[in-house]
Image (tube, rainbow, N blue to C red):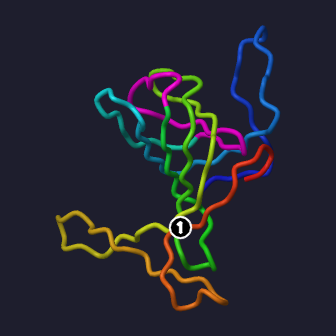
Amino acid sequence: MNMSSEPTSIMRPRSTPERRTNGRFPLREEASYRIILSKLPPVSGVGETLNMGSGGILFTTREKLPVGRTIEVAVNWPAKLGGTCPLKFVAVGRVVRSEDTQAAVRIQRYEFRTRGVRAAAEPGQPQPLQASRCTPSGENAGRQTDTYSAPSAPGEL
């Protein structure tokens, strides 16, 4: 995990003004992505976040993604729910910029979900993914949960 409290900006030519109203923060975590709501052949892959903010996310890709398409990006979140439950940040938005090895997405909505954890595997075998058994405290104690949603409003994350 690599987080800093200082906003970052992408290097842009001097003639291009910064259009973002919210800052972005450097965050290097594994991310998976997939184009959704499309009649075209599926496009998906795995990359790494470069920076995130309440309005968008920049991440690496293995190919140039189609600008304007709706995409789902899932990021392994560095913090744990209750200090023990691994989370992932899942955002849906539009690809607003894409190059051969990275893409920028404007977030339209997002939620936090619990994520599975890797179990020990036999040598030479892939690690199996197990469902996470995270439960909140209080009135929902004892009930398994898998989604924690948050509204996506400008300036909130």
Picture layout, residue 5 above or below residue 46:
below
Relative horizontal placement of residue 62, taking residue 135 as reference (left or right): left
Residue under the image location 80 percent in, 46 percent down: 155
Task: Name the main secondary structure of what is drawn in magenta.
Answer: loop
Range drawn in magenta: 50-69
Residue 41 screen position, x and y as percent: 28, 29
Q: Please, is residue 37 above or below residue 121 in the view?
A: above
Camera-side residue of 122 and 36 = 36
As for residue 60 lying within the magenta part, the answer is yes
For label 1, the residue is 147
User: Residue at position x 73%, y 40% from top?
Assistant: 24
Q: From the viewer's perspective, is 62 left or right of 96?
A: left
Callout 1 amino acid: Thr
Q: Which residue is nearer to you in this view: 62 or 72?
A: 72
Q: Residue at x 59, y 36 (%)?
A: 58
Kind of element beneath mark 1: strand
